[in-house]
Image (spheres, rainbow, N blue to C red):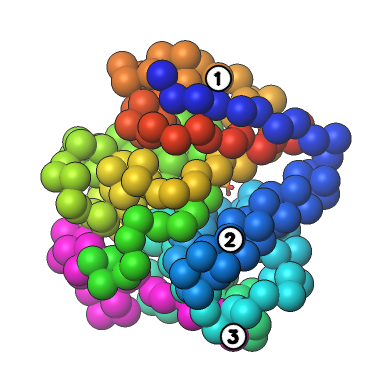
Amino acid sequence: MTEIEWWDYEDTEELAAAVAGDIQFVIESALDARGSAVIALAGGKTPMAAYEKLAQAKLDWKKVTIIPGDERIVKLGDPMSNVTALAKIFLPKGARVKPIVPDAISDYKAAGRSADALMQDLHWPLDFCLLGMGTDGHTASIFPGPDFDEALSGPKERRAVGVMPEPLPPEAPVARVTLSAAAIASSKALMIMITGEEKKTLLEQAIEQGPSSKYPIGRVLAEVELPVDIHWAA
Ligand code: 6PG
């Protein structure tokens, strides 16, 4: 059973500041230990305020590599592109923000293979991975659909896969590339950031259900051996 610690905050402002502080601490620890840091950051709206605060940290950003924990298969610059949102915030600080989906690939399976190859060249395991969660219990882009099993329980060495969510999520109705559950579970530090009662209740159920959870995040967390911090505000 994964060791979970919940951290509750008065409001989303306090939540964002706490998450930014924790990520800064993890980056600083990696820089002290190895002189570099490689982190995967969640897409979606929830973590953006935390990223803006994190970008104000006085860090040797040129030694920090940031990848999106998952990516919508769209062109760079598209409003749905997770790496574009991360680049706007962290590139001006000198961080290395790396796309995981080459612009030209439309075949999502090929995009997944390309992302996996790219990640094979990164220092591994990740120093840190931030996850969000959808109201259907997906995390990263591990969604129900024909590729669910491959993203969830494919070969341990596979770090990224292409997925076609079914049904397509309304907020970004496109194919995706995602960190695999094994890649997420291998991270040296893992954090979940969510807001709202609905998501908190769902996540508590998913954790309780464990490896047989009907929610992807419950299945992912069941693979995780290290303690997981969950940061939440109503
Ligand atoms: C994505 C994210 C995804 C996100 C959840 C929650 O690309 O969509 O990585 O896993 O964390 O969908 O998104 P919100 O924070 O916008 O609710």
The earlier-in-sequence mark between 2 and 3 is 2
* Kind of residue indicated by mark 2: Ser
Instruction: Find residue 29 and name its label.
Output: 2
Quickly name the residue at label 3. 94
Q: Give the range drawn in magenta.
A: 94-118
- Residue 134 position within the rendered picture, expressed as x and y whole percent measured from the top left: 51, 38
Q: Which residue is drawn at 85% across and 35% down?
A: 10
Q: What element carries label 1?
A: helix
| Residue type indicated by callout 3 | Gly
- Relative horizontal placement of residue 25, taking residue 105 as reference (left or right): right
Between the residue at mark 2 and the residue at mark 1, the CA separation in whole angstroms equals 30 Å
User: Residue 220: which numbered mark, if any?
Assistant: none
Residue 117 magenta-highlighted: yes
Between disc 2 and disc 3, the foreground one is 2
Is the C-beta of the residue carrying label 3 under 8 Å from the nearest atom of ligand 1?
A: no
Q: Which residue is drawn at 26% across and 72% down?
A: 121
User: What's the CA distance linking mark 1 and mark 3?
Assistant: 38 Å
Confirm whether residue 16 shows in the render: no
Is residue 20 in sight in this rendering? yes
In this view, 88 is above or below 137 = below
Q: What's the amino acid at mark 1?
A: Glu
**Left or right, residue 156 beside residue 72:** left
Q: Which residue lies furthest to the front in this view?
A: 33
Q: Camera-side residue: 154 or 76?
A: 154
Q: Does the magenta stretch include residue 25?
A: no
Name the spot of residue 129 as percent of width and height, x first: 48, 52
Residue matched to label 1: 204
Give residue 116's quadrant in the image. bottom left
